[in-house]
Amino acid sequence: MELSLRPLAAMCILLATVVAAPAATTEVEVEIETTDAQSSYIVHVAAGHAPRLPRRGLLTTRAYGSFLRDHIPVELSTPAPRVLYSYSHAATGFAARLTARQAARLASSGSVLAVVPDVMQELHTTLTPSFLGLSPTSGLLPASNGATDVVIAVIDTGVYPEGRASFAADPSLPPPPSKFRGGCVSGPSFNGSALCNNKLVGAKFFHSGLEAARGRALAEDLESPLDTNGHGTHTASTAAGSAVADAAFFDYARGNAVGMAPGARIAVYKACWEEGCASSDILAAFDEAIADGVDVISVSLGAVGNAPEFYDDTTAVGAFRAVSKGIVVSASAGNSGPGDSTACNIAPWFLTVGASTLNRQFPADVILGNGETFTGTSLYAGEPLGASKIPLVYGGDVGSNVCEEGKLNATMVAGKIVLCDPGVNARSAKPYAVKLAGGAGAILASAEVYGEQAISSPHIHPATAIPFAAAEKIRKYISAQTSPTATIVFRGTVVGPTPPSPRMAAFSSRGPNFRAPEIFKPDVTAPGVDILAAWTGANSPTELDGDTRRVQYNIISGTSMSCPHVSGIAALLRQKRPEWSPATIKSALMTTAYNVDNAGGVIGDMSTGEPSTPFARGAGHIDPNRAVDPGLVYDTGAEDYITFLCALGYTAEQVAVFGSSTNCSTHAGSSVGDHNYPAFSVVFTTNKLAVVRQRRMVRNVGGDARATYRAKVTAPDGVRVTVIPRTLRFTATQKTREYVVTFAQRIFGSVTKNHTFGSIEWSDRKHTVTSPIAITWPASQVAEM
Ligand SMILES: *[C@@H]1O[C@H](CO)[C@@H](O)[C@H](O)[C@H]1NC(C)=O
Ligand SMILES: *[C@@H]1O[C@H](CO)[C@@H](O)[C@H](O)[C@H]1NC(C)=O
Ligand SMILES: *[C@@H]1O[C@H](CO)[C@@H](O)[C@H](O)[C@H]1NC(C)=O
Ligand SMILES: *[C@@H]1O[C@H](CO)[C@@H](O)[C@H](O)[C@H]1NC(C)=O
């Protein structure tokens, strides 16, 4: 699942437009014929018009029943609308089954701010504590006591706690924080009172939106927080799983498995099911998590396709209210890289996380008949292939270039190794198809855009994944030989300095920000390649039906895996620095992040084999022990985010979706570039030499009341950068100082790239507070190379 689209998720893109106003008359005529069918919508209601709900609004769908009767005229009242959820914490409003005409009528009502079609969203570890520098004896981990007073909400596919020591009661932990009001529900397959404890303190599920979308109820035994997929169990244990000695996927990655915040409590909100995650279910999960009093929310999921407008993006809406209440929301950037502007969860209030590698490999070499060797990657754990070479064929010559099940010619494949192209079916389905056709093994070619990267999978048949260029050479070898041969040698787990680490995963989604290009994204990178963490007992590690294996731990990749690392680190910071806002925690992680790998070069990018850019790695790789003492921070709060939304030109109704009664006309003249972000993104749009100014305010959170910070600028190509003042003097802690940065284009047509990058570093010699600068150039000014 980590990198593949779910079929229904892709299908639901079709629904992704707002019902803004009643359609023109002629269009209404057409719609009457086609749209008596109901579909699901999220209705944002103006604060003054919302019915009063009891504190826990979720189960009280009745109040909005009468709201609907008041707002939908009798002639439109059949089929009767059905309320799925009422929201009062993450949003004000409800989700309901409506016809298109009922939805349009509601959208035109003065009581309603917006009517958003419910869409499906997609889901986007042993070595990582030491890779992140977490030590039980020094630094952030002991300083925060492992975050024992912090509750991390994980909105995902649920949890599979039975027999998983990551979620076992921990006698060394104090009782859970008393402010947490959540708990565990039970279902036929999930006994909350038996499975929940002082580690797993919450487990709830939300499926009304999903059931409405699929048009039939879930099987009764599925109605529970139980994770039948594995993804949610993996992310939750990565964030805050208890330590488990000698954990491994078969023999791979064997070691002590522990979450980033080993003392933090886990509250699971299941909103993702086999078909994907309905926006209405995600919003209900946010609503409940906020009401339960969690401290951090981890969301390893996002919209399908381009990031939606923020008012249309339920994850952004729910996250806004959470962040306004002091909850950190850490979100995955997505697995749609390496193209530009592919990142999702890009609102400024998210802590948006990209994915990079660890210093651990699972090499599996292809050795050709002519002795040439290509290193791939694999988590195959069965009987190895012999040392002697066996016949090698290309899938395209034996029935299916992508090695689809049922399409390979068994006569031509029997006993051979098959080279398979990427795409169409899941990676681990390809060797399985070869197995079914009687083949001996498979070599999986990677997509060209993935460059140097191949993705490890827990194959059930001998197979290795190799980078595109190596696959091309093997393809040439096959066509040049009369009897090509090969074997695959599995080398197990290799930890070491080569290749350098971290490197950016090719799939990690990139900036610039598709909706607000002056808000720098992604924010940071963290480990998201080949992560070991707990897995469900209700699904195989490959997620293939034909794979009958059940494992305690699985190794998977994705920004879904890097996000919970940052959620766990945010939990540690939350406990150590209880007075810090979510924006302060993000600022601390961004300005202390590192950009150099363990070989001393700039963190590489596997998609190009070149140094990565800040639009891939964000402000850099998180460095938890430094983040605890950042020196200066860039803080923002709900009012700043509203100013940002106003600067985007949102209407009063669109801004009100975020729960603000602010009138944007009082924010006239505000600019997105002045949002107090710990990074700079400047967009030059004109053909004239332009000058852009951005304003920032920093707060002194260093230990010393008196501090003097000096600016050091590394200017991006083509720009002159001026910082005024160049020195910031503080005479007390918590004091703030402002500065202004001027970005002036140099000579016209002087750059050769669409984006150029630099940085501003403030240093008092004790702290270095670094912000990346990204410049986006108009195509007309980018010189041909
Ligand atoms: C659930 O677990 C509790 C505690 O172990 C036990 O007392 C109870 O009987 C169980 N309920 C069911 C329905 O199995
Ligand atoms: C499979 O390959 C064999 C040998 O080349 C051939 O005789 C047979 O027709 C092929 N079968 C199919 C279904 O194409
Ligand atoms: C916002 O303020 C302007 C000017 O003060 C006023 O004309 C307008 O009616 C206000 N809009 C709302 C929605 O309150
Ligand atoms: C720059 O962007 C343009 C589109 O705006 C694209 O066609 C071009 O390939 C990009 N150039 C580089 C070097 O990425």
Image (cartoon, helix red, strand yellow):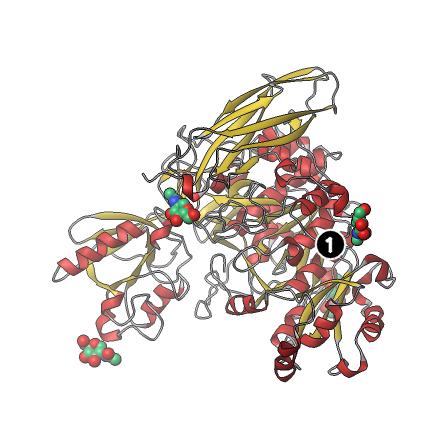
Tell me residue 620's x, y (percent).
Answer: 51, 35
Q: Residue at x 64, y 47 (%)?
A: 648
Tell me residue 467's x, y (percent).
Answer: 32, 50
Location of the C terminus (image quadrant): top left
Q: Quadrant of residue 593?
A: top right
Q: Quadrant of residue 445?
A: bottom left
**355 relative position to 636: left or right:** left
Q: Quadrant of residue 587?
A: top right
| Number of numbered discs overlaid on the protein picture | 1
The residue furthest left is: 482
Q: Residue at x 52, y 59 (%)?
A: 305
Res. 225 in view: no
Is the CB–ligand 1 distance for label 1 below 8 Å? no
Residue placed most toward the observer, 485 or 447 = 447
Residue placed most toward the observer, 158 or 637 = 637
Amino acid type assigned to the residue bearing label 1 in the image: Ala
Q: Residue at x 28, y 67 (%)?
A: 439
